[in-house]
């Protein structure tokens, strides 16, 4: 039996959030129009009220992900002058969505380009923090940022169920290893 569409109108952001959940749960197949509408409990007409076509939905979804998972976090951290920007970035990333977006990028050219932009933006941001916090020169700060980011993404992909506390502990351990502080900790 088909689920009856709910009378409540969904906003554009609602469709995009549903899209991210579908992508995380079912991979690129979760973004098929029928699957999105079923998950939303809405009709195709409701979908087309917000999106010209499915391709526009996918492009908007990728841009929404980019903004929510990178630009918004960087802007908030810069606004508050938070020195834990790297930790905030790590804590804000949902491992299932990161993994799903990387899988989507393997089959969608727009997602691939956006992912490359996001990876560069995140590394540049971490390098900027490294320069501010340690006084490193740009080249060294960027090399360290690349290592940090590779570790973060690798951790999110390999250990998606370990939780934020464990990620924070691993990040702290990495920081100790890099700075030489806390070497007596075993």
Image (cartoon, rainbow, N blue to C red):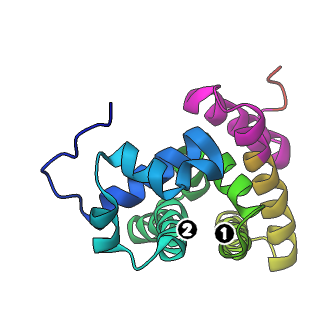
Q: Secondary structure at mark 1?
A: helix
Tell me what residue is drawn at x 27 percent, y 63 percent. 46
> Residue tagged by mark 1?
111
Rendering coords of residue 12 (x, y %): 31, 66
Q: Nearer the viewer, residue 33 or 2?
A: 2
Quadrant location of residue 127?
bottom right
Predominant secondary structure, magenta span: helix
Residue occupying the far left of the picture: 7
Q: Evaluate if marks 1 and 2 touch, with contact meaning CB atoms under 8 Å apart.
A: yes
Q: Secondary structure at mark 2?
A: helix
Q: Which residues are magenta?
A: 154-182
Q: Residues within 10 Å of mark 1 (few under 14, many from 20)?
A: many
Question: Label 1 to label 2, Cα distance in Å?
Answer: 6 Å
Q: What's the mark number on residue 62? A: 2
Q: Nearer the viewer, residue 72 or 177?
A: 72
Q: On screen, 148 above or below 11?
A: above
Q: What is the count of numbered marks?
A: 2
User: In terms of sequence position, does the residue under pointer 1 or pointer 2 come before the other?
Assistant: 2
Is residue 166 magenta-colored?
A: yes
């Amino acid at each position: 039996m088909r689920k009856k569409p709910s009378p409540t109108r969904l906003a554009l952001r609602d469709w995009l959030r549903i899209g991210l959940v579908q992508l995380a749960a079912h991979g690129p197949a979760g973004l098929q129009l029928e699957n999105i509408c079923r998950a939303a409990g809405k009709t195709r007409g409701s979908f087309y009220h917000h999106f010209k076509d499915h391709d526009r939905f996918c492009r908007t979804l990728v841009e929404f992900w980019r903004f929510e998972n990178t630009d918004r976090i960087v802007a908030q951290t810069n606004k508050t002058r938070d020195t834990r920007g790297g930790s905030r970035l790590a804590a804000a990333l949902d491992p299932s969505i990161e993994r799903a977006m990387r899988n989507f990028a393997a089959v969608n050219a727009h997602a691939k380009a956006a992912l490359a932009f996001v990876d560069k933006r995140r590394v540049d941001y971490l390098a900027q923090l490294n320069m501010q916090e340690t006084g490193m020169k740009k080249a060294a700060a960027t090399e360290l940022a690349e290592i940090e980011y590779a570790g973060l993404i690798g951790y999110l992909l390999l250990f998606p169920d370990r939780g934020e506390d464990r990620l924070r502990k691993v990040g702290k351990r990495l920081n100790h290893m890099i700075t030489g502080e806390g070497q007596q900790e075993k």
